[in-house]
């Protein structure tokens, strides 16, 4: 992916020939990705809770979901770190 912006001491600047509209499109795509990852995490959390209630904590599926949950948490944490979203879900 080619970078559209550059951080400078004065702030962030847009590289020519990119437009603000193009930068907003890319921002929207990243926000969509963050929302999709958060929705996946919620779904995995729900499935894990259902499996715990059914006593299926020792199944391979449960362990795979647990690993997926941890991966999603790490991905979302990284997004929040780089986007400056401390404390936001």
Image (cartoon, grey):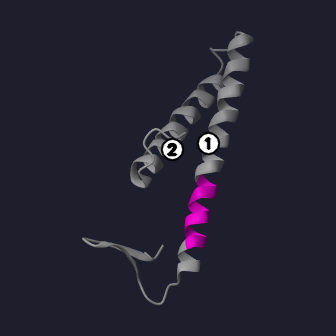
56 lies left or right of 25: right
Q: Are marks 1 and 2 in contact (CB under 8 Å)?
A: yes
Q: In x, y percent, where is residue 74?
A: 47, 40
Magenta stretch, overall SS: helix
Instruction: Name the secondary structure under disc 1.
Output: helix
Residue placed most toward the observer, 18 or 68:
18
87 lies left or right of 48: left
Q: Residue at x 43, y 75 (%)?
A: 3
Sequence order check, earlier mark of 1 and 2: 1
83 lies left or right of 21: left
Confirm whether the magenta stretch covers residue 30.
yes
Confirm whether the magenta stretch covers residue 25.
yes
Q: Residues within 10 Å of mark 1 (few under 14, many from 20)?
A: some
Is 37 rendered above or below residue 47?
below
Is 29 rendered above or below residue 63?
below
Which part of the image, by quadrant, shows the C terminus? top right
Q: Can you identify the residue that label 1 sits on?
A: 38
Q: In x, y percent, where is residue 7?
A: 32, 70
Is 28 rendered above or below residue 80?
below
| Circle on res. 76 | 2
Q: In x, y percent, where is residue 76?
A: 51, 44
Q: Residue at x 51, y 33 (%)?
A: 70
């Amino acid at each position: 992916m080619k970078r559209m912006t550059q951080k400078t001491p004065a702030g962030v600047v847009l590289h020519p020939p990119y437009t603000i509209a193009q930068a907003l499109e890319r921002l929207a795509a990243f926000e969509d990705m963050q929302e999709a990852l958060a929705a996946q995490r919620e779904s995995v959390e729900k499935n894990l809770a259902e499996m715990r209630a059914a006593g299926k904590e020792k199944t391979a599926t449960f362990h795979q979901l647990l690993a997926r949950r941890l991966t999603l948490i790490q991905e979302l944490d990284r997004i929040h770190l780089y986007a400056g979203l401390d404390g936001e879900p």
